[in-house]
Amino acid sequence: MIGLLVIIILFVTISIIYFEYEGRKEAIMLSKETPEERQIRVAKLEEGWKATIAENERKKILQAQKDAKNKILQDQKDEKKRLKQERKRLAMMIRCPKCGSTNITPFRETFGVGKAAVGAAFLGPVGLLGGFIGSKPVFVCLDCRKQFKK
């Protein structure tokens, strides 16, 4: 365990010494360069920075275009979903078979006399309510006055 710790410390020390040496070497090279070499080096750095900035701007523009396209696609999906729900809601509405109006009101429940008679025979007066079992409501169109069952 101690041996591993010593090896790590040596590695870190050697790395620090190496990077300091490289830094000094770079500083010595920079101090020996002529003004023309310095001007060329600075121009290359500026050119690299400009290229990097231009590349970053291009990436931003492409990302903005991609985001706009995704937003449009999402809006289209949302609109399709909304239209599908609207169609479903309209399909569930009761419409007049004659004029197609949705201005409909329930008028009365139909009463089955046969069902009421059978119910009365088995259950007495309460069985008369059996006439309403399984009956469908009658609807009336308020526009054309047609009566119909759904």
Image: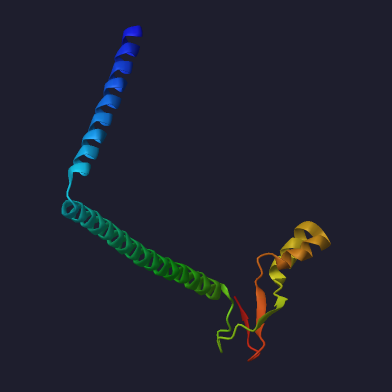
Left or right: residue 29 versus residue 73 is left
Quadrant (top left/top right/bottom left/bottom right) for the C terminus: bottom right
Residue found farthest to the right:
125
Residue shown at 33%/17% (left/top)? Answer: 9
Residue shown at 26%/35% (left/top)? Answer: 23
Residue shown at 42%/70% (left/top)? Answer: 76
Position in image of residue 63 (x %, y %): 35, 62
Residue shown at 54%/76% (left/top)? Answer: 90
Location of residue 105 (image quadrant)? bottom right
Left or right: residue 92 versus residue 19 is right
Residue in the foreground of this view, choosing between 21 and 104 = 21
Position in image of residue 41 (x %, y %): 20, 52
Residue in the foreground of this view, choosing between 59 and 73 = 59
139 is higher (above) or lower (below) than 30? below
Colouring scheme applied when the structure was drawn: rainbow
Quadrant (top left/top right/bottom left/bottom right) for the N terminus: top left
Left or right: residue 24 versus residue 60 is left
147 is higher (above) or lower (below) than 130? below
Residue found farthest to the bottom:
144
Position in image of residue 87 (x %, y %): 50, 74
- Is residue 1 visible from the viewing direction of this image? no
Position in image of residue 48 (x %, y %): 24, 56
